[in-house]
Amino acid sequence: HAIQSECLSTIDLLAPVTTKGLDRALAFLAAYHTKLTPAVEDLLRRATSDKDAVRMGVEYACEFGAASMLKILTKGWNKDTLDFNIANQLLERALMSDNADTVDTVRAFVPSVSSENIALALTRGRADVLKLLGLGEDERSIEAAKKRLKAEIANKTASIKDRMPKSV
């Protein structure tokens, strides 16, 4: 409840003694974009020893664009840490968050970007994300993608995932 109520003083009191339910705690920290105080950062570092907590924390950090949290949880990861499919699933979540810092953090441990994620990035049309993926050199193609998405939204043919970024 402390995370949901966004009471930093209570979070800071509970973080050092939290040992159970780390996976849910990390999910809430990501979803509520909780400020990373020293106590919360220490909790995240301690959580890296719990495989299930890290998995859930990384998934939620990707989904909700919690880049600072993601950097702590994935410290030391590289392109060999995860297999291609899992890494690209995380990248998909990061792309859907529309947070360039999150995409950049995940990109560091993705062996190669899948064609589906390239298509998703182009569909989302975020210039900062496209540039990170080496797709943003042509401003006309970005504008064309934006116009196409606007037309799809107006015609009610756009996927619900493409209609509104999670960061809004």
Image (cartoon, grey):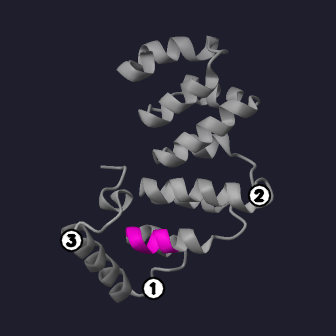
Please give the residue where the numbered disc 1 appears in the rendered image: 137
Question: Callout 1, which amino acid?
Answer: Glu
| Mark 3 or mark 2, whichever is nearer to me | 3
**Residue nearest the viewer, comparing 74 with 112:** 112
What is the spatial separation of the Cα atoms under label 1 and label 2, in whole angstroms? 29 Å
Q: Is residue 65 left or right of residue 162?
A: right
Q: Secondary structure at mark 1?
A: loop
The 10 Å Cα crowd at callout 3, few under 14, some 14 to 19, many 20 or more, is: few
Q: Which residue: 37% across, 86% down?
A: 141
Question: Callout 3, which amino acid?
Answer: Asn
The 10 Å Cα crowd at callout 1, few under 14, some 14 to 19, many 20 or more, is: few
Residue 109, quarter of the rendered image: bottom right
Closer to the chain start, of discs 1 and 2, is: 2
Please give the residue where the numbered disc 3 appears in the rendered image: 155
What is the spatial separation of the Cα atoms under label 3 and label 2, in whole angstroms? 38 Å
Q: Which residue: 49% across, 44% down?
A: 66
Which residues lie in the magenta part?
Answer: 119-124
x and y percent of residue 93 in the render? 52, 53
